[in-house]
Image: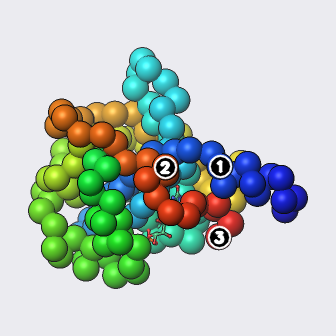
Amino acid sequence: MKEAILKNMAHMTYGIYVLTTRFENTINGMIASWVSQVSYDPPLFMVAVHPNRYSHELLTKSGHFALHILAREQKDLLSLFKGPIAREKFASIAWEDGMTGCPILTDCLGCMECRVTQSMAPGNHTLFIGEVVNAVFNEGKTPLCTLDYEGCYLGKE
Ligand SMILES: Cc1cc2nc3c(=O)[nH]c(=O)nc-3n(C[C@H](O)[C@H](O)[C@H](O)COP(=O)(O)O)c2cc1C
């Protein structure tokens, strides 16, 4: 990859979100920053997930995801969602089942549950587009983004 492309990639700014899924009795959560709104009406959001992620399998099978906006003060929460063992990710935090069955973190700035309406794989990530079917929002905090985070997600693998 050309140096200038890599530099540009590393200087893009994104929100940093927690993406959760459930298929049958299995729940999982991962950090996701390749996330975007793609429509106002209907409200559609896109998440780009690498096929190597365990969440990819759950998302493909269930057709639902929940996207959490974290507050800036919640940066430490990210470390919970880095590990490979799904049940450990939720062991120390409060959450409940959402309308779609996805785990919803009690403490977050906002959360949108989405039903996947389309997916495509134009490159090394699958783009899942989901329509919001349920949302909660808690006023008063600043959202966490890549400017608050050391390092960046380049999506190589
Ligand atoms: C700041 C940050 C942003 C990330 N963004 C994404 C992303 O948008 N898509 C993706 O597939 N992985 C992303 N990751 C990597 C996944 O969160 C990580 O591989 C996670 O362990 C996957 O969990 P799973 O395999 O249990 O689903 C990101 C990681 C970090 C630290």
Residue under pointer 1: 11
Of residues 23 and 20, which is closer to you in this image?
20
Q: Is residue 53 left or right of residue 91?
A: right
Residue beneath the point at 80% across and 52% down: 5
Q: Is residue 95 visible?
A: yes
Q: Is residue 29 left or right of residue 8?
A: left
Q: Nearer the viewer, mark 3 or mark 2?
A: 2
Q: Residues within 10 Å of mark 3 (few under 14, many from 20)?
A: few
Residue 14, horizontal then vertical, whole percent: 52, 45
Q: Is residue 92 above or below residue 13?
A: below
Residue under pointer 3: 157
**Local secondary structure at mark 1:** loop
Residue beneath the point at 22% across and 49% down: 108
| Mark 3 → mark 2, Cα distance in angstroms | 22 Å
Residue 73, horizontal then vertical, whole percent: 26, 54
Could you say which quadrant of the image residue 143 lies in?
top left
Numbered mark located on residue 147 in the image:
2
Q: Earlier in the sequence, mark 2 or mark 1?
A: 1
Under mark 3, the amino acid is Glu
